[in-house]
Image (cartoon, rainbow, N blue to C red):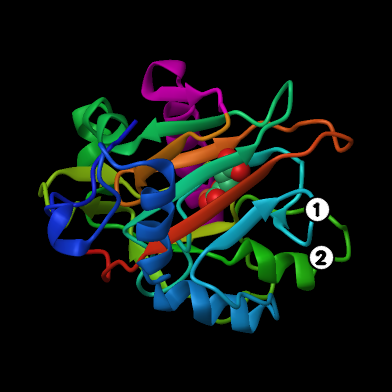
Amino acid sequence: MLFSCGGRPLRRHGLPQPGQSAGHRLKALRRLRMSICGRQLAARMRISIDADVVLIANVGGGLLGNDELHAHYDHHWTPQPSASSFLHALEVPSRGGDTTWINAVLAYETLDEATRREIDDLQLITYNPFLRRLRPLASGRAPLYRTPEIEPLSPYVAHPLVRTHPDSGKRLLYLDTHTEVEVLGWPARRGAALVERLRAHLLQPRLAYTHRWSVGDLVWWDNQATIHSRSAFEAGERRVMKRVSLAGTRPF
Ligand SMILES: O=C(O)CCC(=O)C(=O)O
Ligand SMILES: [Fe+2]
């Protein structure tokens, strides 16, 4: 399954080709470079990434465990979030661990016109959720919106709430479903109400595709047009995936 990769020809970048054997495709994947922002984030989080290929697994020192992951854009809180990612399944659990992608272009296009006008020029901060884990609130809760009494997590960066896809030129909702965010320049109550409404819109099943993994699957998604989530799976089962992310550009 392939969403897109910014419209760039595959062959020019030496990316995996549809007709190649699994071994050749893996070799091509290994040649790809992980995005700079991913490396910087890993260094900041003191996560050791000694290869371009990141282990997403609940065993063997992999990242992201077996819990549910809410829908997100990878590296959303960095200045240049990755453009796309490849995920390759090596071991899959018997139940759960499905990955869902939500079409953020369709989400934007299906908003009513008044809402689109209201949000078109807004800027949004999406705070780094890994930093929140390192600096939990006294209450222990993970806020969905930063209110004035919460010290802002730093570093942070603001991006447009409605982003323009760098290749297709389409507008899309550049918001995830559960991370701590803040609409720049809006009172918290108004911003939180808007974000809650937009998130309910994003979570409509008609915008989503869910992938049930088989061993050997390789999925390539556009991180500039979709958010993705993962369902939980039993801790006693093994799920082993390898991921490569491609560098992106500053959202506009
Ligand atoms: O485990 C998955 O299916 C997705 C994990 C994830 O969010 C990622 O690799 O970016
Ligand atoms: Fe992700």
Q: Position of residue 90 (x, y in %)?
A: 61, 41
Main secondary structure of the magenta stretch: helix
User: Which residue lies under the disc numbered 2?
Assistant: 137
Q: Is mark 1 within 8 Å of ligand 1?
A: no
Q: Nearer the viewer, residue 223 or 219?
A: 219
Q: Amino acid at mark 2?
A: Leu
Q: Is residue 126 left or right of residue 161?
A: right
Q: Position of residue 116 (x, y in %)?
A: 23, 38
User: Which residue lies under the disc numbered 1?
Assistant: 141
Q: Is residue 34 left or right of residue 152?
A: left
- The N terminus is located in which quarter? top left
- Mark 2 residue element: loop
Q: Nearer the viewer, residue 227 or 160?
A: 227
246 shown above or below 243: below
Mark 2 nearby-residue class (10 Å; few <14, some 14–19, many ≥20): few
Query: Which residue shows up at 45% across the image and 21% down it?
Result: 204
Q: Amino acid at mark 1?
A: Arg
Marks 1 and 2 close (CB-CB < 8 Å): yes
Q: Which residues are magenta?
A: 186-214
200 shown above or below 17: above
Query: Which residue shows up at 45% across the image and 52% down it?
Result: 73
Residue 96 painted magenta: no
Q: Residue furthest top?
A: 206
Query: Which residue shows up at 72% across the image and 58% down it?
Result: 62
Residue 165 visible, this angle: yes
Q: Is residue 91 left or right of residue 172?
A: right
Q: Nearer the viewer, residue 95 or 108?
A: 95
Mark 1 nearby-residue class (10 Å; few <14, some 14–19, many ≥20): few
Q: CA distance from mark 1 to mark 2?
A: 6 Å
Residue 210 painted magenta: yes
